[in-house]
Amino acid sequence: MPVATAAKVEALRIDFKSAAALADMLGVSRSQVTRWLRGAGIDPLNAERVDLLELVWSSLLRVYEQEAALAWLFGVNPALGDRRPIDLVRAGRAEELMRAIRAERADSFA
């Protein structure tokens, strides 16, 4: 059974320490995240961003500690054409992100 997007929003808010930090990561207003946390519906585009951020975050935490995972999200990444992974989360570029994370995982076990 899939996890509800609202539950993912709450879990990400806890992981990132605030609704404001989560809003920044998703490229939405803090009030938007607050509305989601209070039970307002999430539009399909933002639901996809939440799903992707949760997937990327959980995958990164299998490779890195939390601070290193955050640095990876916000750092310029050569494997992503010198783009920041968080910008690809906002753009919904799941395949590129997961490919880069798989490469990170392979390097960490090499």
Image (cartoon, grey):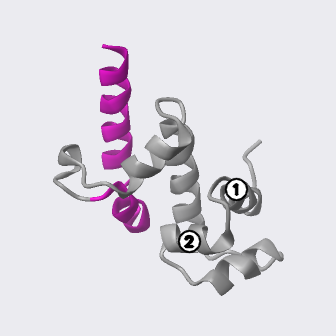
* Up-down relation of residue 44 to residue 3 (above or below): below
Residue at x 77%, y 41% (from the top left corner): 1
Residue 106 on the magenta segment:
yes
User: What residue type is disc 2 on?
Assistant: Asn
Residue at x 18%, y 46% (from the top left corner): 78
Percent across and percent down for residue 92 are 41, 62
The C terminus sits in image quarter: top left
Q: Quadrant of residue 17?
A: bottom right
Secondary structure character of the magenta stretch overall: helix
* Residue underneath mark 1: 8
Percent across and percent down for residue 42 are 67, 74
User: What residue type is disc 1 on?
Assistant: Lys
Q: Front-most of 50 and 70? A: 70
Can you name the residue that lies furthest to the right here?
Answer: 38
Q: Residues within 10 Å of mark 1 (few under 14, many from 20)?
A: some
Q: For the magenta stretch, what is the residue range?
A: 84-110
The answer for how far apart the CA atoms under marks 2 and 1 are is 12 Å
Residue 44 appears in the rendering: no
Can you name the residue that lies furthest to the top here?
Answer: 110
Q: Is residue 14 left or right of residue 77?
A: right
Indicate which disc, 2 or 1, sits on the residue closer to the N terminus: 1
Percent across and percent down for residue 69 are 46, 44
Q: Residues within 10 Å of mark 2 (few under 14, many from 20)?
A: some
* Residue underneath mark 2: 46
